[in-house]
Image (cartoon, helix red, strand yellow):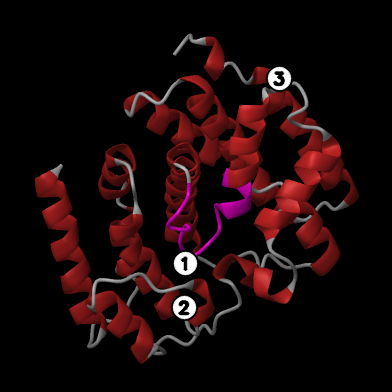
Amino acid sequence: MCDSWNTIAGHRQQFEQFAEEWLALHPAPMLQLKREHTYAVLEHAQNIVRQEKIGGEQGRAALLAALYHDVGRFPQYATWKTFSDAHSKNHGLLGVQLIKRSGFLKDESLPVQRLVLAAVGMHNRYCLPAALPPEVRLVTQVVRDADKLDIMRIMARYLNETVPSEDVVLHVRNEPEGWSQRIVDTILSGKIPGYTELEYVNDFRMLLGSWLRDLHFRTARLSFLHSGWLEAVLNGLPQKEPFTAVCTYLYAVRDRILHDL
């Protein structure tokens, strides 16, 4: 990985300075978590572009988009004290505005700038538009896969501990037996629920498990399946129906994917 497209050390320094400035003004544990998340997402993106042999402008844009994908979270949390887009503003769009205003990409080629801004703006959508240009879709999918992988790591940890903030679990209700029928129905029909449908922590656990079907790259699927995060998240569900049916279904999906890989 010695190609010039992969040299983003200057951008890492730029992001670190940005994060340090925000943390100095707003020393919140959630923003520190967001900085750590950013570097983990970048590491996953680096693994994906290396293993999937994504180079050139698309490879560079994927790494930069991974690095800057959540910069909008910093003003979002400082202003609204939440990471809920529904209760504040879309953090992807906030990120695009901040990147433009701060000039983070001023030394990049216009094609790279456009790809990065598109990926940052769309990384948190429920699904991508059907008519996206292939290069935009590719870069955005790298970020989305890398983001999901680290969210799974975080949730595998915090769903089984005392969470530092209800923002970690999107303010859903922490009722041990609570669940939503529509989440179960969506997953068992082979689809992926959306964040806006969640009511309970158990809904969140089931949603995370359904991401098995929402990873684009083979590299990301392998990381997901060999990490143990899926089992850690699902093991926290009550040992009763309908959770047993959902787990049985998701583990069958896991086994089919592993077989196909």
Q: Which residues are magenta?
A: 119-132
Q: Is residue 223 left or right of residue 147?
A: left
Query: Magenta stretch mostly in which secondary structure?
Result: loop
Decide whether residue 155 is among the magenta residues: no
Identify the image quadrant of the N terminus: top left
Is 32 left or right of 41, judged from the image as shown?
right
**Badge 2 amino acid:** Val
- Nearer mark to the viewer, of 1 and 2: 2
Instruction: Look at mark 2 in the image and give the residue it sits on.
Output: 201
Where is residue 242 shown, x and y percent of the image? 24, 87
Determine the residue positioned at 17% across, 52% down. 257
Residue bearing mark 1 = 159
Q: Which residue is mark 3?
A: 10
Q: Quadrant of the C terminus?
A: top left
Secondary structure category for the residue under label 2: helix
Q: Nearer the viewer, residue 206 or 237?
A: 206
Q: Is residue 54 above or below residue 88?
A: above
- Residue name at image x 42 percent, y 47 percent: 145
* Amino acid on which disc 1 is placed: Leu
Q: Earlier in the sequence, mark 2 or mark 3?
A: 3
Crowd rating for badge 1 (residues with CA inside 10 Å; few <14, some 14–19, many 20+)? some
Q: Residue at x 54, y 85 (%)?
A: 173
Q: Position of residue 102 (x, y in %)?
A: 84, 37
User: Label 3 crowding class (10 Å Cα cut-off): few <14, some 14-19, many 20+?
Assistant: few
Disc 3 marks which amino acid?
Gly
